[in-house]
Each structure stands twice: as C-alpha cells, then as structure tokens.
Amino acid sequence: MRFLRFTKPIVGKVEELGELSTEAEYPQFDSIAELVASAGDEAKFLGYANSRIRASVKQAVTNAINSGDKALGADKILADARAAGHDWTIASARQRGQGVTAKAQVFDDIMARVRRGEQVSQEELATLASQFGA
C-alpha cells in the first residue's frame, strides 16, 4: 500500500471557528490482499464493496432517468434506466470517466489545443459530449 496526497486541501467548516483546511493523504492499495487486510477480513471487504456498488448502481439509474430523452416517453426512459442498473459493471462505471476531475482534464486539454491553433472537430466534441452525458 502507498499513500498519495490530495491535489487540493480538504476544507470543512466548524461552528465558531469557520472554515478550516488541511493537506491530507489517502491510501492506494496495490493488491486485493491489501484491500482485504484493510477491511479486516474478506466478508467485511465484500460488504464494503457491495455497499459502494449499490450506491453506484443507484446513481447510474438516476443518471439514466435524468438524461432520458422526453421524446422516448416515460416507459422507454424507465426501461433504459433499469437496464443501466442491471448491466452495471465496475469496468463500465470506471471507463465513462464522468467525474469532475476527468471532465476538467478533458476541457483543459481541448483549451490547450485551441490556444495552439489546433482544430477540434465537431465529431470529437460530440463524442466527448456523449461520454460525459452532455
């Protein structure tokens, strides 16, 4: 296991003290054995993973409903949302890269290309919009 430092300070508020911030590190596991050891045992690790998966699937279903095209109608939107939940995998959840950090990095890359005078095709922008749910 190794520890990485967050790129930005972690900020919170405390009544009467106001906003507080600190640098912090987080663990990065290099093997399943390290994950299991951190959890205490395999059953606790599976419980933890399954609770995170449940939350991720719920978010995927919510996102599918929220991004549904009203022209399809409620029944089709809800059927697609149920399918998104049923077909969820860790690989598909991670490959979309919809986090704000991933979006910001893609935006920064595009802006750097534009500043260098490079063209960004409509097809490329459409692909990115699709990837990020825009």
Image (cartoon, grey):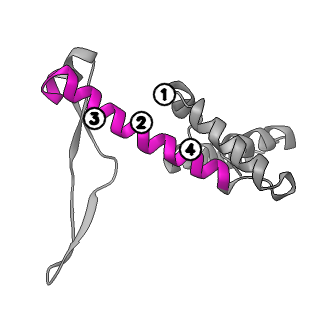
Dot placed on the residue nearer the N-terminal end, 2 or 1: 2
Discs 3, 2 touching: Cβ within 8 Å: no
First along the sequence among labels 1 and 3: 3
**In 3D space, how far apart are the residues under numbered discs 3 and 4 (Cα atoms)?**
19 Å
Give the Cα separation between the discs numbered 2 and 1.
8 Å
Above-or-below relation of 66 to 97:
below
- For mark 3, what is the residue? 48
Say what amino acid the circle numbered 3 marks.
Tyr
Please tell me the numbered disc located at residue 5. Answer: none
The residue pinned by badge 4 equals 60
Find numbered disc 4 in the image and state the secondary structure of the residue it sits on: helix
Secondary structure at numbered mark 2: helix
Closest to the camera, between mark 1 and mark 3, is: 3
Q: Earlier in the sequence, mark 3 or mark 4?
A: 3
Q: Amino acid at mark 1?
A: Ile
Residue picked out by circle 2? 53
Q: Is residue 44 above or below residue 125?
A: above
Distance Cα–Cα, label 2 vs label 4:
10 Å
The foreground one among 57 and 38 is 57
State the extent of the magenta-drawn residues as a range. 37-65
Crowding at mark 2 (Cα within 10 Å: few <14, some 14-19, many 20+): some
Amino acid type of disc 4? Ala
Q: Is residue 126 left or right of residue 51?
A: right
Q: Earlier in the sequence, mark 4 or mark 1?
A: 4
Q: Quadrant of residue 98?
A: top right
Residues marked 2 and 1 touching at CB (< 8 Å): yes
